[in-house]
Image (spheres, rainbow, N blue to C red):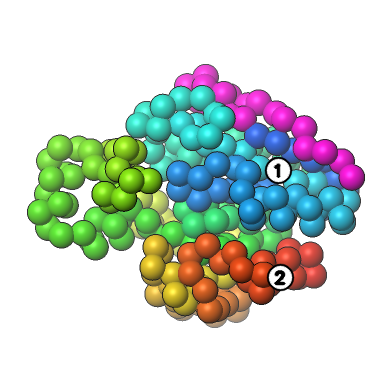
Amino acid sequence: MSAPIPFTLHGADGKRIHGDRVQGTGRQVLFITGFLSKRWGNKSKALLHWCQEQGWGFCCYDVRGCGESEGSFTDYTLSDWVADARTVLAMLTSGPPLTIVGNSLGSWIAWLIARDCPLVQQLILIAPAFNMMGERARAIPKERLHAWHTAGWMPWDDDPLHRDWPLSWKWVEESEAYWESTFDGVRRVRTTILHGLQDTVIDPDGSRRFADELQRRDPTFPLDLRLVPGDHRLSDPAQVETLRRLVVEGW
């Protein structure tokens, strides 16, 4: 089996984007992480293993400001992370056909970049966080929303995992703007949404609404919405096996 080889790319500000890649034939898989996540976790390790078994290519990376990539988290917003994904995607365009597996916010980023790249032939979106910050702004108490807008910064919540990661109000503005154009210029890429019914982080109703709107616009769009038992992580053995089948057997 081929071992992952580190790579370095540069963002628009010159900061380095660090990732790992395995060369393969026939197909390649790009994994895009979720919000505040590093590139190597249970899902990316499983995807790497499955790709190695098949002799396929695989790639994952850290966005600027997270993991091993350069930059401070507070210097970047959604548009920067979309740009990072496009930079990595450009590196892969000389390879075989591509499946993008996105996780949470990475799923929405995957959807946004796939419409510009004919190489992308399949999307697997895990608990997609469509319009993540816009939805967050609507869900929090009015007092907290006012404070966020007035101060310009706010942590996602007061959980110890999040409170030291202040979010610019620009996240909300960009999220809403991207959401307004989410269904513009859509390519007919075969798309599967996998979302846990017990997800308390990203409401599965968001995936339902996305699917309804997409199919209202294009009733024959190749979309498979799978709402399954499980939480946001979808990490138990049965859920991992479902993902494996979508990746390996669903091609």
Residue appearing at x 70%, y 50% in the figure: 45
Q: Quadrant of residue 152?
A: top left
Q: Which amino acid does label 2 sit on?
A: Glu
Residue beneath label 2, please? 241
State yes or no: residue 214 in magenta: no
Residue range of the region highlighted in magenta in the rendering: 1-18
Q: Is mark 2 on a helix, strand or loop?
A: helix
Percent coordinates x, y for residue 100 in the rendering: 65, 54
Residue 19 place in picture, x, y as percent: 65, 34
Q: Is residue 78 left or right of residue 30?
A: left
Q: Is residue 61 left or right of residue 249?
A: left
Residue 72 disc label:
none
Could you tell me which residue is drawn at 44 percent across and 59 percent down? 129
Q: In this view, does 206 lie to the left or right of 21?
A: left
Residue 15 shows in the view: yes
> Residue 161: where, in percent of width, then height?
38, 46
Three-letter residue code for mark 1? Cys
Report which residue position mark 1 lands on.
Answer: 59
Q: Distance between the residues labelled 2 and 1?
A: 20 Å
Q: Which of 11 and 216 is in front in this view?
A: 11
Question: Quadrant of the image for the N terminus?
Answer: top right
- Which residue is most to the front? 160
Crowd rating for badge 1 (residues with CA inside 10 Å; few <14, some 14–19, many 20+): many
Q: Does the magenta stretch include residue 6?
A: yes
Q: Where is residue 71 in the image (x, y as percent from the top left)?
A: 46, 25
Q: In which quarter of the image is residue 226?
A: bottom right
Q: Can residue 86 be seen in this view?
A: no
Q: Earlier in the sequence, mark 2 or mark 1?
A: 1
Q: Is residue 219 depicted above or below 24 in this figure? A: below
| Nearer the observer, 132 or 37 | 37
